[in-house]
């Protein structure tokens, strides 16, 4: 058995269906990015850097763009489920491949619980009679079952959610322009460069939804063309939108008020003069969280599917539904873990831990991109070098406890992998 090749069963039902077009793929990417990052992480980043988190946002955008281009050329060459997990196995070695897959799962499962809680918080502000955790669990259960009915239906549902979110954020920007005050940007960098670097690491996590496109490589129509285009469109739209929204928010109320709120954009909208912004932002945030959670479950289940094919996870997770051609057991397991995290989870530390694990994931992606054959390269080599260097710098800018926790999760992953492979054999 060659560990560099995925092991598939003879059952044709294990093949996924190429139902996603360019619009659907962009929708999945935007749905993964424009949610918890812009509605929640903005406040956390403002807390660690003050108004200078705007610089951190730009640094994170540059880093994310380089990483996105590396991911795009890899996905065009290897259009299989699993993303960097697949590239690590094919271009590096099994240890790198497994590390990427395990870090992806750790990051996205944790983030899924956080996003569900974020949805619950915004939903309970709109409907105070519904406890936040009840709403979080309900959303996780609903979207888990939505994923069971096929990637095409899930993709179209996601596109509707993303459209509502984009309209909400555009209304926020337009409404906030008259309330912008340059004085709210002072003092600009109260915690110096270290604060900017930490905010960039946190905000990088907010940009990384484009990875979801790559993990759906086996379900995208004409992946060699569609995936690079979808990744580039997704990251450009996200960077422009994030900077516009963040600038308006901090200019309206200042970094301290953003940092003190679990719903920073709603807090900023309180001073806007146009009618209904507070409620529109709340509704937009809730729908955005749904979009992120939907795409989290999609990506998690496909990563489990890919890892099960190589015995890195129990082989039962390779099972697909014969009618809708989706990895149903992976969807159910991912949804179950997110429900548990929705019940017991908190937000600040999880965001930082998820940021560290996803930085390791993209570090491996850039190393794999450097190993691509010249004929498969779509972009200059310096892009992967900048992406790798930025991942390293952003990772070490996080707090030591976060770094140690992330490394501990990786060690646990290798122990479990050893056990799974012994059981599977």
Image: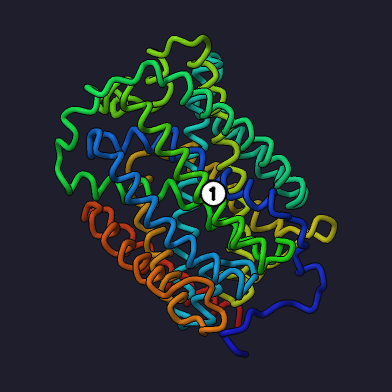
Residue 318 is situated, as x and y percent measured from the top left of the image, at 68, 67
Q: In front: 142, or 273?
A: 273
Judge whether residue 134 can be spotted in this image. no
Residue at 56%, 23% in the rendered image: 283
Rendered image quadrant of residue 415? bottom left
Rendered image quadrant of residue 250? top left
Q: In front: 330, or 63?
A: 63
List the residue tagged with mark 1.
Answer: 337
Question: Is residue 333 positioned above or below 281 on the image?
Answer: below
In the image, farthest residue toward the bottom:
1
Question: Is residue 158 positioned above or below 303 on the image?
Answer: above
Q: In which quarter of the image is the C terminus?
A: bottom right
Question: How does the figure colour the protein chain or chains?
Answer: rainbow
Residue 98 is situated, as x and y percent measured from the top left of the image, at 48, 73
Residue 361 is situated, as x and y percent measured from the top left of the image, at 43, 64
Secondary structure state at the residue bearing disc 1: helix
Residue at 47%, 33% in the rendered image: 118
Residue at 51%, 9% in the rendered image: 275
Residue at 26%, 61% in the rendered image: 393
Q: In which quarter of the image is the N terminus?
A: bottom right
């Amino acid at each position: 058995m060659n560990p560099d090749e995925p092991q598939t069963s003879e059952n044709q039902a294990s093949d996924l269906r190429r139902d996603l077009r360019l619009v659907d793929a962009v929708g999945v990417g935007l749905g993964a990015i424009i949610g918890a990052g812009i509605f929640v992480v903005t406040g956390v980043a403002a807390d660690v850097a003050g108004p200078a988190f705007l610089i951190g946002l730009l640094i994170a955008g540059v880093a994310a763009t380089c990483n996105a281009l590396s991911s795009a050329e890899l996905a065009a060459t290897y259009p299989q489920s699993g993303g960097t997990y697949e590239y690590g196995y094919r271009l590096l070695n099994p240890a790198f491949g497994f590390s990427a897959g395990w870090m992806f799962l750790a990051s996205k499962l944790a983030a899924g619980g956080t996003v569900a809680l974020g949805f619950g918080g915004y939903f309970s502000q709109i409907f105070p009679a519904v406890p936040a955790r009840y709403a979080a669990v309900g959303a996780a259960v609903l979207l888990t079952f939505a994923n069971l009915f096929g990637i095409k239906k899930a993709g179209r549902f996601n596109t509707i959610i993303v459209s509502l979110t984009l309209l909400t954020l555009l209304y926020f920007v337009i409404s906030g322009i008259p309330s912008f005050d340059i004085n709210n940007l002072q003092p600009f960098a109260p915690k110096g460069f270290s604060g900017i670097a930490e905010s960039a690491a946190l905000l990088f996590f907010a940009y990384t939804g484009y990875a979801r496109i790559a993990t759906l490589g086996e379900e995208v129509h004409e992946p060699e063309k569609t995936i690079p285009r979808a990744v580039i469109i997704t990251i450009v739209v996200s960077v422009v939108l994030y900077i516009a929204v963040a600038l308006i928010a901090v200019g309206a109320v200042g970094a301290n008020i953003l940092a003190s709120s679990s719903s920073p954009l709603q807090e900023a909208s309180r001073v806007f003069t146009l009618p209904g912004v507070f409620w529109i932002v709340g509704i937009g945030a809730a729908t955005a969280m749904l979009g992120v959670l939907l795409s989290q479950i999609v990506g998690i289940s496909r990563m489990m599917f890919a890892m099960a094919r190589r015995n890195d996870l129990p082989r039962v997770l390779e099972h697909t539904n014969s009618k809708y051609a989706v990895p149903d057991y992976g969807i159910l397991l991912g949804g179950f873990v997110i429900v548990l995290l929705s019940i017991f989870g908190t937000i600040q530390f999880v965001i930082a831990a998820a940021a560290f694990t996803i930085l390791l994931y993209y570090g491996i992606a850039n190393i794999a991109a450097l190993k691509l054959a010249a004929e498969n390269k779509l972009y200059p080599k310096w892009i992967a070098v900048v992406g790798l260097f930025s991942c390293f710098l952003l990772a070490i800018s996080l707090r030591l406890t976060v770094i140690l926790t992330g490394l501990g999760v990786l060690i646990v992953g290798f122990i479990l992998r050893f056990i799974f492979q012994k059981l599977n054999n």
